[in-house]
Structure formats: structure tokens, C-alpha cells
């Protein structure tokens, strides 16, 4: 009988301790979003290139291992660009288990990015420079994958009238096996990327690629576009190439390869029912966009579907552009092989 009061006190003590712990956890949970928001916004106040990032609110999902930066934005601080570089519904930093190790994940929910061209550096907008170089240091663990959900990406130019907006919408991208791939990285990196999007109002884009470090960074990607109504490109072609497409549809295959500082792009167009008109002015323009347009107008790509291509090679010494005959290139390689 004498022990009963002691047991009651003991049980009451455990209950009080449990209540205190719960109160502390609830208080921490309520305070955490405000603390994280303050830290994040202070870190993003001065981004390289004159950009500034911010999040309107923070959603901490402890059971899912996620922190969501909601209504996330990156803007150019000088106010000379009329659209933000990036706005999105949510940027989600997650934590997952990969075998026995914890990894970080990034999920971009409905991002809307605008790359803006201008002759003036102050009015150009291509985003903060060197973002990937700093990203790994800002994550708690090695990055495992990146996902883009229902994104929109624009190439804009506000100087022509009307202005130019070439866009891809409903963008989905999944880039996985990224452990060790972000700079400085290491040779064990073997990552894969795949994606799809609607290009302008009619085209369908598919993408797949690989990124490795063995030991030099090497990225290869194949993309295809189907059923793009060619006149949708007229705002760009009229402004930069002084040509106009009257009718036609475009399919194309594109192959991209980057090794070190060298970049190679090969584009193989397939043109259907194509009619293009060139304007008289700027006939001597060396713009590769115009050269492609003139070649298309001359039927260079239609004579033998899939056998004509555009190759652009970028190196530290400069950029080379050429129109090539793939069939002739294949025959030359075969002859060289036979001679050896």
C-alpha cells in the first residue's frame, strides 16, 4: 500500500516528460519553416551574376524527408529584364536511402524559366553562372537524382517587335545516378538523363543522354523532334535569318557531344511539304541560322531525306559551322577502313 503513491508519482513524471517532449517537438516543427525560410533567403540574397533568389514559404515534411521551398523565384536584381529567370511552384529537397547511405534529391515542380537574349549585357538573362559548381556544397548528402515535373522553358528576345518567345512546355526530365557527378566529381560517375516536352504548339521532343567522368567529363545526348509546324519558327527566322517559312513540317534528329571544352552538335532535318522564302536584305550575312535557312530554301535537306545535316563545333579557338552530306561521310569512312 505504501508504494502506490510512489508509482502514481513515477507514472505522472513520465507523462509530464512525454508532454514536454511533444510540446518541444511541436514548437520546433512550427518554428522550423520560419527559421529555414530566413536562412534560405539570406543565402540567396546575393547570387552570382546579379541575381537574387527567394521563397515565399517553407513546407517541412518530416515523414517524407522533404523540405519544399514554395513559390521559389530567381530574378535579375537590376530590374531591366521584365520576367524572372526562374519561378516555380515548389523546389523540393529530399533525402532518400541508397543502399545503406543517405542521398539528396532535387525535384522542380512546375518550373518556368526564361532565357533572354539582348545586345545589352544588362538586359541579357541566362541565369546565375557556375550554379552546378556550388550546388554539391549546399546539399547535406551526395546528389542522387534531379527531376523536373511539368516545366516550361522560354527563349525570349524583347527587342524585336513583336518580341520573340520560343518555348517548350510540359517538360519532364529525370536525371539519375548522379552520385559523384557534380563538380569536382570523380570517375565513378555514370549518370543517365531522359526527358520529353511539347515544343511550341505542335512539336514533340524526346531526349535521352549519358554523362560520365572517365577521367574527363563527357556528355552525350540524342534528341528528336516530330511534327513541328515550320511556320511557328518564323518570329526567330525573320529576326535572325531574314527568311520566312510559308508552309511545311519538320522532324529532326540531333546528336550532342561534349568532351572537355569541345562541343559538337549534329542536326539532321527531315522536311515535308516545305516552302521557304528569303528576303533580299542581308544577303551577305554569315549567320549560321541564315545559312541553314538558305540551304533549306534551296532544297538541300529535301533531296535525300536524312542524308543532309548541319554540324556545329565549338572550341576555345572558335565555332565552326558546316553543311554536310552524311552519305558521303559514311562512304569516306568505309574507303579509309578498306585502305587500312
Image: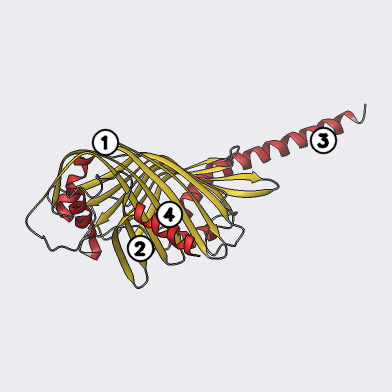
The tag earlier along the polypeptide, 2 or 1, is 1
- The residue pinned by badge 2 equals 313
Viewer-side label of 3, 2: 2
Q: Residues within 10 Å of mark 2 (few under 14, many from 20)?
A: some
The tag earlier along the polypeptide, 4 or 1, is 4
> Could you tell me how far apart the alpha carbons at marks 2 and 4 are, in whole angstroms?
40 Å
Q: Is residue 292 above or below residue 19?
A: below
> Could you tell me how far apart the alpha carbons at marks 4 and 1 are, in whole angstroms?
36 Å
- Percent position of residue 232, x then y: 21, 41
- The residue pinned by badge 1 equals 201
> Could you tell me how far apart the alpha carbons at marks 3 and 1 are, in whole angstroms?
71 Å
> Could you tell me how far apart the alpha carbons at marks 3 and 4 are, in whole angstroms?
46 Å
The tag earlier along the polypeptide, 3 or 1, is 3
The tag earlier along the polypeptide, 3 or 4, is 3
- Front-most of 36 and 49? 49
Numbered label attached to residue 41: 4
Q: Is the C-beta separation of discs 4 and 1 under 8 Å?
A: no
Locate residue 8: give its quadrant. Answer: top right
Viewer-side label of 2, 4: 2
Say whether residue 252 is left or right of residue 237: right
Quadrant position of the N terminus in the picture:
top right
> Could you tell me how far apart the alpha carbons at marks 3 and 2 are, in whole angstroms?
78 Å
Q: Is label 4 in a helix, a strand or a loop?
A: helix
- The residue pinned by badge 3 equals 10
- Front-most of 269 and 78? 269
Viewer-side label of 3, 1: 1
Viewer-side label of 3, 4: 4
Locate residue 332: give its quadrant. Answer: bottom left
- Which residue of the protein is positioned furthest toward the top in this rendering? 1
Viewer-side label of 2, 1: 2
Question: Coloured how?
Answer: secondary structure
Amino acid at each position: 500500500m505504501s508504494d502506490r503513491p510512489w508509482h502514481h508519482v513515477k507514472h505522472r513524471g513520465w507523462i509530464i516528460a512525454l508532454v514536454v517532449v511533444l510540446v518541444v517537438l511541436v514548437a520546433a516543427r512550427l518554428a522550423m519553416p520560419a527559421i529555414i525560410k530566413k536562412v534560405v533567403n539570406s543565402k540567396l540574397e546575393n547570387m552570382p551574376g546579379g541575381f537574387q533568389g527567394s521563397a515565399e514559404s517553407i513546407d517541412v515534411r518530416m515523414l517524407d524527408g522533404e523540405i519544399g521551398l514554395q513559390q521559389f523565384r530567381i530574378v535579375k536584381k537590376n530590374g531591366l529584364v521584365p520576367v524572372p529567370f526562374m519561378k516555380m511552384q515548389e523546389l523540393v529537397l529530399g533525402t532518400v536511402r541508397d543502399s545503406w547511405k543517405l542521398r539528396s534529391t532535387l525535384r522542380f515542380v512546375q518550373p518556368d524559366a526564361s532565357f533572354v537574349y539582348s545586345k545589352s549585357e544588362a538586359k541579357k538573362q541566362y541565369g546565375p553562372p557556375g550554379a552546378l559548381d556550388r550546388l554539391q556544397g549546399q546539399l547535406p548528402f551526395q546528389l542522387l537524382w534531379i527531376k523536373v515535373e511539368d516545366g516550361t522553358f522560354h527563349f525570349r528576345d524583347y527587342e524585336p517587335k513583336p518580341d520573340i518567345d520560343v518555348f517548350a512546355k510540359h517538360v519532364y526530365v529525370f536525371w539519375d545516378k548522379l552520385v559523384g557527378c557534380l563538380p569536382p566529381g570523380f570517375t565513378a560517375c555514370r549518370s543517365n538523363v531522359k526527358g520529353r516536352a511539347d515544343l511550341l504548339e505542335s512539336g514533340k521532343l524526346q531526349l535521352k543522354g549519358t554523362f560520365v567522368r572517365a577521367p574527363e567529363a563527357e556528355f552525350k545526348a540524342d534528341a528528336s523532334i516530330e511534327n513541328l509546324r515550320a511556320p511557328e519558327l518564323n518570329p526567330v527566322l525573320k529576326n535572325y535569318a531574314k527568311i520566312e517559312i510559308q508552309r511545311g513540317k519538320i522532324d529532326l534528329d540531333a546528336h550532342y557531344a561534349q568532351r572537355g571544352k569541345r562541343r559538337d552538335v549534329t542536326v539532321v532535318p527531315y522536311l515535308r511539304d516545305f516552302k521557304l522564302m528569303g528576303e533580299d536584305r542581308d544577303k551577305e550575312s554569315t549567320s549560321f541560322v541564315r545559312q541553314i535557312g538558305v540551304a533549306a530554301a534551296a532544297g538541300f535537306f529535301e533531296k535525300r531525306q536524312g542524308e543532309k545535316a548541319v554540324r556545329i563545333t565549338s572550341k576555345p579557338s572558335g565555332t565552326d559551322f558546316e553543311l554536310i552530306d552524311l552519305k558521303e561521310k559514311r562512304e569516306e569512312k568505309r574507303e579509309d577502313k578498306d585502305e587500312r
